[in-house]
Amino acid sequence: MPPFDDYTWSEIQSQPQAWAATLDLLHGRAAAVRAFYQNQPFDQVVFTGCGSTYYLSLAAAASLREIGRVNAVGQPASEIWLYPRTTFPTDQRTLLVAVSRSGATTETLRAVESFRAAGRGPVLTLSCYAEQPLAQLGDLNLVIEAGQEQSIAQTRAFSTLYLATLYLAALQADRADLLGELGRLPAAGRQALDTYQPLAHVLAANERLERCFFLGSGARYGLAAELSLKMKEMSLGESEPFHFLEYRHGPQSMANPGTLIVGLLSGTNHARESAVLGEMRAHGARCVAIGAQSADVELVAADELVRGPLYLPFGQMLAYERAVWRGLTPDRPHQLSAVVKLGDAT
């Protein structure tokens, strides 16, 4: 047994059950969400959060742009709070979607409060704890209790909250087909967890490994950024995210036998993205492709528009295994806490 409570591993492994519970919850709230969309019109959407949920916001905004053809962006909550003129350059009516695992992060609360004070538009909140402040601040508040965690580094919370944003996008676009596709994710996630844990273990135990890169484009860039953050938080290792083709523009100079590159492949641009990994293998880097076709980590087929959560479990296991290999405690990352609360001066 590991010398710690091992909450992180159990939270990674329990994601399929959490996804199923989240879908059940959202099915029950679907009428309320549709009424909210009808009664609170908006011209654009801003997703916001801090840390992991900022990266979630990037992925959610990209997914909404693709699914719903809605102008949407992701912004750090601190930017909305401190730099509203650069965040909202126009007076268009905006829907703010504030996402927070804890529901108590100071910057996110300040962002919502300042957004409301400026009268910019409606607010929808996504969090995991009904008793926390954020769950009281929206015109519609969705509490995803299945995402609650005891560990500091987000895993289950991230994927369940991200799943919720995909559900909201499918509702907004009136895509019943995508709602059905989301229902396939729990079984597909279970298969990925059960099948690829040995590969994560082997890769993490590579003594030559010096750095990791996570590549993803479109909505997968936010997911790559989140998995890179997991590697930093848990293992204290060097890790960076890049868009696929951007990796050729400088970072490829670091592709060598001490480099692990994890690529989150799309279906649409599979050939171009795979070509990047092929070139980096030629430079000596160890490359792992995650995708629905011709991949080292093969995802059970689901519509590409809502497949995003399936990319997460392998990268989370990889970060966990690397931390354990280095003798670290994934449940208690160095210098981190589960929620950041600022004093008045900060």
Image (cartoon, helix red, strand yellow):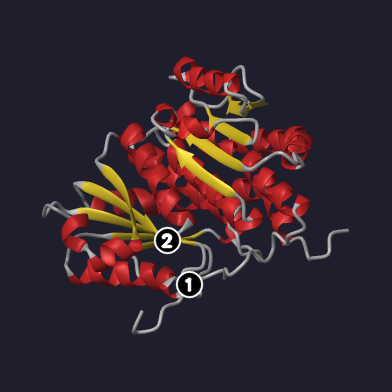
Q: Of 217 and 133, which appears nearest the observer?
A: 217
Secondary structure found at label 1? loop
Question: What amino acid is found at the position of numbered circle 2 in the picture?
Answer: Cys
Asked whether residue 24 is in view, the answer is no
Q: Image check: 49 left or right of 45?
A: right
Q: Which of 251 and 299 is in front in this view?
A: 251
Name the residue: 60% across, 42% down: 211
Q: Name the residue under label 2.
A: 50
- The residue sitting at 61% across, 64% down in the picture is 152
Which residue position is annotated with label 1?
Answer: 340
Across and down, in percent, residue 277 comes to 54, 23
In the image, what residue occupies the spot 57% across and 61% down? 145
Do the residues under discs 2 and 1 have CB atoms within 8 angstroms?
yes
Q: Which amino acid does label 1 sit on?
A: Val
Q: How many labels does the image show?
A: 2
**Residue projecting furthest to the right:** 1
Distance (Cα) linking label 2 and label 1: 9 Å
Disc 2 crowd, CA 10 A, few/some/many (<14, 14-19, 20+) = many
Quarter of the image for the N terminus: give it: bottom right
Q: Quadrant of residue 332?
A: bottom right
